[in-house]
Amino acid sequence: MARTLVLAAAQLGPIQKAEGRDVAVGRMVRLMEKAHRRGAEVVVFPELALTTFFPRWYEEEPERADRWFETALPSAATAPLFEAARRYGIGFHLGYAELAHEPDAAGRMRKRRFNTAVYVHPSGEIVLKYRKVHLPGHAEYDPRRGVQHLEKRYFEVGDLGFPVVRAPLGGTEANIGLMICNDRRWPEAWRVLGLQQVELVMLGYNTPSLNMENRGFEAHHLRVFHSHLSVQAGCYQNACFAAAVAKAGTEDGHELFGHSIIVNPQGEIMAQATSWEDELIVAECDLSMCDLGRRTIFDFARHRRPEAYGRITAQVGSEAPPAWRPRPAG
């Protein structure tokens, strides 16, 4: 029996700082309607899809950024997305800033902030939640930077790991996992999902067109190349599909690149956005394509050698290797 899924990646154009959530949600509902007309069963929206990319703005008191966060889903502002999902029978992925009151690792109840993504079933039930692990940027104001990137100031490192769940998607079931933005650049994240037989990875991003750290030259076109390279390699090496979906365009004067893509288990780009505006791309995914890689080259049970990979989890920073020197003459 065929296991096919019509998958849509819903790229968003810029969301300006002055715009309310109602503007972004209205645009997303219209994209869901378009996805329904094109036969899509799942729609993937970007990272922090409800607001501007607020970590570019420094607040001396981090609590002053709480207005960008959601305390519950659905909320009054996001309810139209859940209603559209039920109306069209479409599941959706949503990236947002999450404000939670819950215990930390020490058991202390406190306010916690995460860069979060969820997958929502057409019924409105949240199937899977993920909190971003690989937070880029910095925590304090950096005068060397023209644009700040303060994810480490406003978010905690995600504490849910990289979970995978088997869930209904359209007319079939699939093993789904989530990532957010910078996670896509870390092969460890893909491999943890691959070890759980993930078949579809949904990930959103808000990525500047320029490297804002400004500590060396990086060609403009390589920003897109590196993004695509990471996703294509992750899909190939873990025999899965992925929808990598951008927020794009000039947002509050700062450029984000688009180039949202849907990728198959061979690492091929099946569909790609070509604008920096709201744009829907759709691909029909045959989930049985995941079988070839995981039964041959990436048959983990036969070929993985974890005893040789100890450094991956035992070490954080890189270490210099021992130096070799030729023996003295004579």
Image: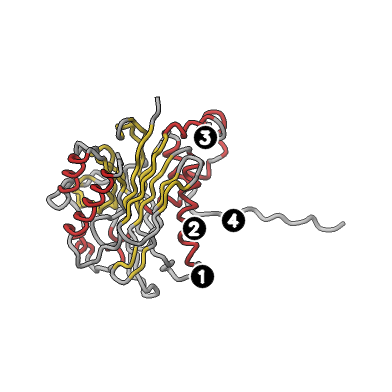
For the residues carrying marks 3 and 4, which lies nearer the camera in this image? 3
Numbered disc 4: secondary structure = loop
When asked about the image quadrant of residue 202, the answer is: top left
**Marking on residue 27:** none
**Marking on residue 225:** 2
For the residues carrying marks 1 and 4, which lies nearer the camera in this image? 1
The residue singled out by tag 4 in the image is 320
Three-letter amino acid code of the residue under disc 2 = Phe
Three-letter amino acid code of the residue under disc 1 = Phe
Q: CA distance from mark 3 to mark 2?
A: 24 Å
The residue singled out by tag 1 in the image is 217
Numbered disc 2: secondary structure = helix
Find residue 123 and report its horizontal and vertical position in percent: 19, 36
Asked whether the residues under the numbered discs 2 and 1 touch, taking CB atoms below 8 Å apart as contact, a structural biologist would say: no
Asked whether the residues under the numbered discs 3 and 4 touch, taking CB atoms below 8 Å apart as contact, a structural biologist would say: no
**Marking on residue 293:** 3
Q: Does 213 sit above or below residue 317?
A: below
Three-letter amino acid code of the residue under disc 3 = Gly
Image quadrant in which the C terminus is located: bottom right
Numbered disc 3: secondary structure = helix
Foreground residue among 41 and 244:
41
Q: Is residue 257 left or right of residue 76?
A: right
Foreground residue among 2 and 52:
2
Looking at the image, tell me whether mark 2 or mark 1 is earlier in sequence order: 1
Can residue 105 be seen here? The reply is no
